[in-house]
Image: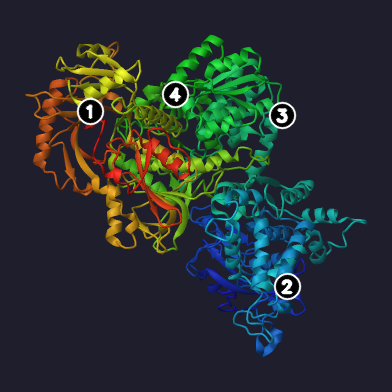
């Protein structure tokens, strides 16, 4: 409906008072108006003309209605919005700023009362052209075109009258965008004593001629509509004399279309919409889009209101409004005062702290007009910040959920929530730092500019100027969020690259100049990375070079296989960076020939794996006398934690305890070193591979003194269940998305709080970031001591805007959302697909909506402790090459994981050992690889060599056993792989939803509908079902629900799929390869893959594997045989179809087989016996490198799945995800990877041809 008549008017006694020529109603409102209702209507004395002296204002509120003034935030709506900014019990429909308001959100209703009034003239309930004109008498006609002309200043008067009536004399903050921003500017000038802070988004203090011209053309479109009838058209529910049957709908649509072109940007339209006519439509995509937006708008807006508000914006000039409305303002004008001077005099009345936010691509109210507001306030020495946001959504960016949450909300909330004294101290500190006259004890949270307590010394000694307003304002300054009484979470997970890493790299880089290792001129710094660290270091290097005479070269070494990944590709395309795809040879030749410029930044893409690149770089650095950055072992990186320590003390001055995880030990050591001794630092060990591991500390050996940490040596280990429980509590109770490690820290923080109820505790969430119930991440408005220091545009915003989105369910049924991609399944393939789709979207600077749906309570096969990844010497050549790429991808994920501060994806890489009896398929395959594949490291061994090759591991193999070894063999933690990929997907903006999904064809037959178990529905053209062994069951359920509608989800290739329940026994190692005894030389057992026929020992061909877990102290064994690999119909039948007697018999076979052949296994005391499933396919075409696609409807929709992973979902998981994303984006997939179209007869064939069946 276009008109929502007020449900009731409140008739209250009023006392008229005068303030700035505005009559207020000062009586207390009725109880029902303020204390109980969420949607209210107030009658206010606001004279707009002789005939309109009172107005009705509809307003809504959230939070505590009894909150004091300093806990009240008021939102002023924009042109097309009303009071319904968020859903509430009186009106449960979604509000226009739903995602910003609520408990724990950026506008936190746990802490603030949030009010949003519809402004006068708005069609959404307040007095407007739709309201009854009293002069029409009993006819009760609306004002229509006879409504008196108003300006944004009159709207501000209405807001002031409302606040006065409901008892708010001075709001903590007012905030508004577009027309709402104009209202904020007017309000803070006309009523300077009624607000403490004001946030102006894309607003202006006076309308520009260009904007006015645009609005004139829009009005002409409405007025020129034949159904306009001078404004006397049919208003909903109110028949007017001589009215037409329809209003000026076409004109209103045309006006809206013109507006949409200026509310967005050309770059967005040109990128977002297809160029030219679609083959099946007479309209272009952009025409269809504008038609849709215009129709939607015309259904919910009134033409007379549109004309009124359009003219109101045209007539806004703050100086003119002040002259008309403020007593004495006109008389105080100096002789010859210009309009600009009058405007500045009006801005001089402002007493509030002001934040002005503008968007670079805003075509309607450009940055120049935000700059004018800022300059006017700055001219009068007002406390004002100017924030520039770069986003293609232009003027409308503030209303785009994803963009708003990523780019606007953190800035707004930092401004709204900071304590007053912080604004002053931060500015003073910033100036002091610039002058190098700084007391390190007063750095506070501004320690992000350098490395904590070392700042003064380093600033004084650096041989160049430090660019504070550029790179260094990125470093650190992460939020501290209160979660419980006396307990806060330090959220370090904002930056996809890791804020801790940025701090550490800055510290390491600058310290090398202090020590003299690097010189401003003539030095070369070398870094080996997969991307993120190179990006950070390149940005810092450029910042210094741009502000100094600086000739220090930076050489970033990246494995060639990573060149097409998002960050290396971004680096390679950056101005001022030169890429050398011929490796060090090409780079050194260019250097010798004098082709490198001053302060040159080069990327050297080197052949080989990451470790091989690191080894080569180390040799080159030593030979050339360069300097190498070692992220994990450079002790100067510890200074980064001084920054964290000082931020904690600034954000929580009375802090008594800090809790952190123990991964590498660096954070614990750094915090202990830099925090005062009066503050306890707590960390506690865990069983390796669960939450935090002591072996990680040993692995990195980076300066962690365990004896100095409270609680570390108490002997208690974290329990995984506790960590998971508190991880879930962080998410469900506090909207903080974090990993197991953060859950464990939260658990320990609770233990400390129980022992000392007065403790003030901060626990470090190394991967923590806040999420919102509407689906978003980044921190919401609960910051302690956060600041917005710089008004300089953030040139690196693209790097920090890819934050995750998380969906939360409610009981209310919602309309199906349209998404570009929906991935079902949180295993290695599903999370990799989500990651790769998100990364490709980020690379293309696209706005695709991508969702991953997974069930965290059902980890599936990837809950295994360890899986193997190795090179496919037993496969065809193209698979061998693909396996090399797959291993490199896993190493990349492992490095990314190291920056996420989680347990490693690849705990150990002990290499491979292949064992085969003569004549077996494995023997034939390995002999073929040895003769034909030309890998010099694939070496045939004699059984007698093995114990010398692998000290501490005793073998008792038949003398005729054929053996081959290779140094590449990775023990992969599936759960950490999935976690790392999921976090990376989140960092690229993928929305994560927890739940179980059903897949159907949409009602129109052209899309795929995905429904979660909480009833939410999503429509998509691209659905990916990667739920492992449950894939076939998902499609089978679809056909069972609706065989006719879902007929296109009938995938015949699943008829060839079968599931095996493979038995698994874990044994301890008789030695201790993870922590070998001194001088023992013991090494971790190689990943062993075998196919042995030994009559008398075992009565079937033994296909088996041995894979290290927990860094080698525990080994997982698998043996496939008549009992060990039973075929079952469904995953759920794993326990039902296999008896305890079967398991007992198989355990005996295991003990006999492995105990005899591999004495290093402690088979006398098995640690456990369990089953896992793998699903396979009889079709010869399918392998672990195969994807299957099935089209749906005739508009290009499809589902993609796998119909058999053959147990290599971990090994090829990232590669399969890469292929799925490439295929979806119409790019070529890698050689060896297949994407088949369902329905081909050849896919049902079981004829292997020349392929070898690999039962192992």
Give the mark toward the camera: 1 or 3: 1
Estimate the spatial distance between the alpha carbons at disc 4 and disc 3, rounded to whole Å. 42 Å
Give the label on residue 223, or none: 2
In the rendered view, how is the structure colored?
Answer: rainbow
Give the mark toward the camera: 4 or 3: 4
282 or 638, which is in the foreground? 282
Q: Earlier in the sequence, mark 1 or mark 3?
A: 3
Q: Quadrant of residue 1176?
A: top left
Give the mark toward the camera: 2 or 4: 2
The location of residue 1079, given as percent across then percent down, is 29, 10
Q: Is residue 794 above or below residue 3?
A: above
Q: Earlier in the sequence, mark 4 or mark 3?
A: 3
Estimate the spatial distance between the alpha carbons at disc 3 and disc 2, rounded to whole Å. 60 Å
Q: Earlier in the sequence, mark 4 or mark 1?
A: 4
In the picture of the structure, the residue carrying the numbered disc 1 is 1105
The location of residue 882, given as percent across then percent down, is 38, 30
The location of residue 1163, given as percent across then percent down, is 15, 26
Q: Earlier in the sequence, mark 2 or mark 1?
A: 2
273 or 179, which is in the foreground? 273
Q: Residue at x 73, y 72 (%)?
A: 224
Give the label on residue 435, or none: 3
Left or right of 436: which side holds 785?
Answer: left
Say whether marks 3 and 2 touch (CB < 8 Å).
no
Q: Secondary structure at mark 1?
A: strand
Q: Secondary structure at mark 4?
A: helix
Left or right of 541: which side holds 365?
Answer: right
Q: Secondary structure at mark 3?
A: loop
Q: Earlier in the sequence, mark 2 or mark 4?
A: 2
Say whether marks 4 and 1 touch (CB < 8 Å).
no
Give the mark toward the camera: 3 or 2: 2
Q: Quadrant of the C terminus?
A: top left
């Amino acid at each position: 409906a276009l008109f929502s008549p007020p449900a009731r008017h409140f008739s209250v006694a009023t006392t008229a008072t005068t303030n700035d020529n505005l009559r207020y109603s000062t009586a207390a409102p009725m109880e029902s108006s303020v204390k109980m209702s969420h949607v209210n209507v107030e009658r206010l004395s606001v004279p707009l003309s002789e005939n309109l002296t009172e107005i009705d204002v509809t307003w809504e509120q959230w939070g505590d209605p009894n909150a004091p003034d300093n806990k009240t935030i008021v939102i002023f709506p924009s042109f097309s919005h009303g009071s319904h900014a968020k859903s509430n019990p009186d009106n449960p429909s979604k509000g226009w700023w739903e995602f910003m308001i609520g408990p724990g959100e950026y506008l936190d209703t746990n802490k603030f009362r949030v009010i949003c009034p519809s402004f006068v003239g708005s069609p959404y309930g307040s007095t407007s052209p739709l309201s009854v004109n009293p002069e029409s008498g009993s006819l009760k006609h609306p004002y229509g075109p006879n409504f008196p002309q108003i300006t944004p200043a009159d709207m501000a008067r209405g807001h002031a009258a409302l606040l006065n009536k409901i008892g708010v004399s001075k709001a903590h903050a007012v905030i508004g965008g577009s027309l709402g921003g104009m209202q904020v500017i007017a309000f803070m000038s006309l009523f300077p004593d009624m607000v403490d802070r004001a946030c102006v988004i894309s607003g202006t203090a006076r309308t520009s001629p260009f904007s006015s011209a645009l609005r004139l053309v829009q009005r002409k479109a409405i007025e020129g509509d034949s159904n306009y009838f001078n404004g006397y058209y049919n208003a909903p529910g109110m028949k007017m004399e001589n009215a037409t049957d329809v209003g000026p709908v076409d004109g209103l649509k045309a006006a809206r279309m013109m507006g949409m072109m200026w509310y967005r940007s050309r770059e967005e339209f040109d990128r977002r919409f297809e160029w030219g006519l679609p083959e099946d439509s007479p309209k272009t995509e952009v025409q269809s889009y504008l038609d849709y937006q215009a129709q939607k708008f015309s259904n919910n807006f009134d033409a007379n209101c549109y004309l009124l508000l359009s003219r109101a914006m045209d007539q806004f000039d703050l100086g003119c409004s002040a002259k008309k409305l403020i007593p004495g303002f006109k008389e105080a004008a100096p002789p010859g005062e210009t309009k600009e001077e009058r405007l500045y005099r009006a801005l001089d009345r402002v007493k509030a702290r002001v934040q002005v936010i503008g968007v670079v691509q805003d075509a309607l109210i450009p940055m120049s007009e935000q700059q004018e507001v800022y300059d006017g306030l700055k001219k009068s020495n007002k406390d004002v910040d100017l924030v520039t946001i770069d986003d293609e959504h232009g003027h409308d960016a503030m209303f785009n959920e994803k963009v708003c949450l990523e780019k606007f909300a953190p800035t707004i909330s930092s401004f709204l929530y900071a304590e007053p004294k912080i604004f002053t101290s931060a500015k003073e500190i910033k100036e002091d730092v610039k002058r190098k006259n700084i007391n390190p004890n007063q750095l506070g949270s501004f320690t992000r500019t350098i490395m904590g307590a070392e700042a003064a010394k380093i600033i004084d000694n650096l041989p160049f100027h430090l660019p504070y307003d550029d790179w260094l304002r990125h470093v650190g300054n992460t939020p501290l969020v209160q979660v419980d009484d006396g307990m806060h979470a330090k959220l370090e997970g904002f930056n996809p690259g890791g804020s801790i890493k940025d701090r550490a790299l800055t510290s390491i880089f600058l310290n090398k100049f202090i020590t003299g290792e690097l010189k401003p001129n003539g030095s070369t710094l070398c870094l080996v990375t997969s991307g993120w660290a190179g990006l950070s270091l390149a940005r810092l290097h450029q910042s210094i070079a741009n502000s100094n005479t600086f000739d220090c070269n930076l050489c970033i070494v990246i494995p060639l296989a990573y060149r097409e990944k998002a960050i290396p590709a971004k680096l390679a395309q950056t101005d001022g960076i030169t890429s050398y795809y011929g490796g060090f040879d090409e780079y050194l030749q260019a250097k010798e020939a004098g082709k490198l410029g001053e302060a040159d930044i080069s990327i050297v893409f080197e052949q080989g794996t990451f470790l091989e690149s690191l080894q080569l770089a180390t040799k080159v650095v030593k030979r050339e006398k360069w300097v190498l950055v070692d992220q994990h072992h450079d002790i100067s990186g510890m200074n980064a934690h001084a920054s964290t320590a000082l931020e904690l003390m600034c954000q929580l001055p009375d802090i008594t305890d800090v809790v952190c995880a123990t991964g590498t030990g660096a954070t614990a050591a750094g915090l202990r070193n830099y925090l005062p001794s009066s503050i306890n630092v707590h960390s506690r060990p865990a069983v390796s591979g669960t939450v935090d591991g002591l072996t990680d500390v040993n692995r990195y050996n980076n300066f962690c003194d365990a004896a100095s940490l409270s609680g570390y040596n108490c002997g208690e280990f974290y329990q995984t269940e506790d960590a998971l429980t508190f991880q879930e509590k962080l998410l469900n109770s506090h909207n903080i998305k974090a990993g197991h490690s953060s859950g464990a820290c939260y658990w320990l923080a609770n233990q400390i709080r129980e022992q000392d109820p007065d403790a003030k505790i901060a626990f470090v969430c190394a991967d923590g970031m806040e999420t919102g119930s509407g689906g978003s991440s980044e921190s919401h408005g609960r910051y302690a001591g956060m600041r917005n220091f710089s008004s300089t545009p953030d040139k690196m915003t693209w790097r920090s805007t890819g934050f995750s989105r998380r969906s939360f369910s409610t009981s209310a049924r919602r309309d199906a959302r349209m998404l570009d991609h929906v991935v079902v399944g949180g295993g290695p393939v599903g999370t990799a697909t989500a990651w790769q789709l998100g990364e490709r979207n980020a690379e293309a600077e696209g706005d695709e909506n991508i969702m991953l749906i997974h069930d965290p309570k059902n980890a599936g096969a990837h809950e295994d402790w360890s899986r193997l990844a190795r090179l496919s010497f037993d496969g065809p050549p193209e698979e061998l090459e693909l396996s090399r790429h797959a291993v490199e991808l896993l190493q990349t994920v492992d490095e990314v994981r190291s920056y996420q501060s989680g347990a490693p994806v690849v705990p150990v890489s002990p290499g491979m050992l292949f064992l085969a009896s003569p004549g077996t398929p494995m023997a034939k395959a390995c002999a073929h690889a040895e003769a034909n594949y030309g890998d010099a490291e694939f070496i045939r061994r004699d059984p007698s060599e093995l114990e010398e090759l692998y000290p501490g591991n005793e073998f008792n193999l038949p003398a005729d056993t054929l053996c081959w070894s290779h140094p590449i063999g990775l023990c992969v933690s599936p759960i950490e792989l999935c976690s790392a990929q999921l976090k990376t997907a989140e960092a690229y903006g993928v929305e994560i939803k927890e739940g179980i999904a059903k897949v159907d064809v949409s009602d129109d037959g052209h899309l795929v509908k995905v429904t979660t178990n909480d009833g939410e529905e999503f429509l998509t053209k691209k659905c990916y079902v990667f739920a492992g062994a449950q894939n076939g069951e998902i499609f089978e359920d679809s056909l069972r629900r609706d065989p006719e509608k879902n007929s296109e989800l009938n995938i015949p290739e699943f008829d060839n799929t079968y599931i095996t329940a493979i038995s698994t026994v874990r044994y301890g190692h008789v030695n201790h390869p993870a922590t070998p005894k001194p001088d023992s030389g013991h090494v971790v057992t190689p990943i062993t893959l075998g196919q042995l026929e030994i009559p008398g020992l075992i009565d079937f061909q033994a296909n088996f594997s041995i894979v290290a877990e927990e860094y080698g102290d525990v080994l997982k064994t698998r043996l496939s045989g008549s009992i060990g690999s039973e075929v079952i119909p469904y995953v759920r039948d794993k326990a039902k179809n296999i008896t305890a007697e079967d398991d007992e018999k198989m355990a005996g076979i295991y003990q006999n087989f492995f105990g005899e052949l591999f004495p290093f296994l402690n088979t006398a005391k098995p640690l456990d016996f369990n089953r896992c499933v793998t699903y396979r396919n009889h079709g010869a075409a399918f392998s672990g490198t195969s994807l299957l696609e099935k089209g749906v409807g005739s508009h290009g929709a499809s589902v993609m799945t796998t119909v058999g992973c053959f147990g290599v979902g971990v090994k090829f998981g990232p590669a399969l995800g890469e292929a799925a994303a490439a295929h979806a984006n119409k790019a070529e997939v890698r050689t060896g990877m297949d994407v088949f179209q369902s329905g081909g007869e050849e896919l049902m064939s079981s004829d292997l041809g020349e392929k070898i069946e690999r039962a192992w």
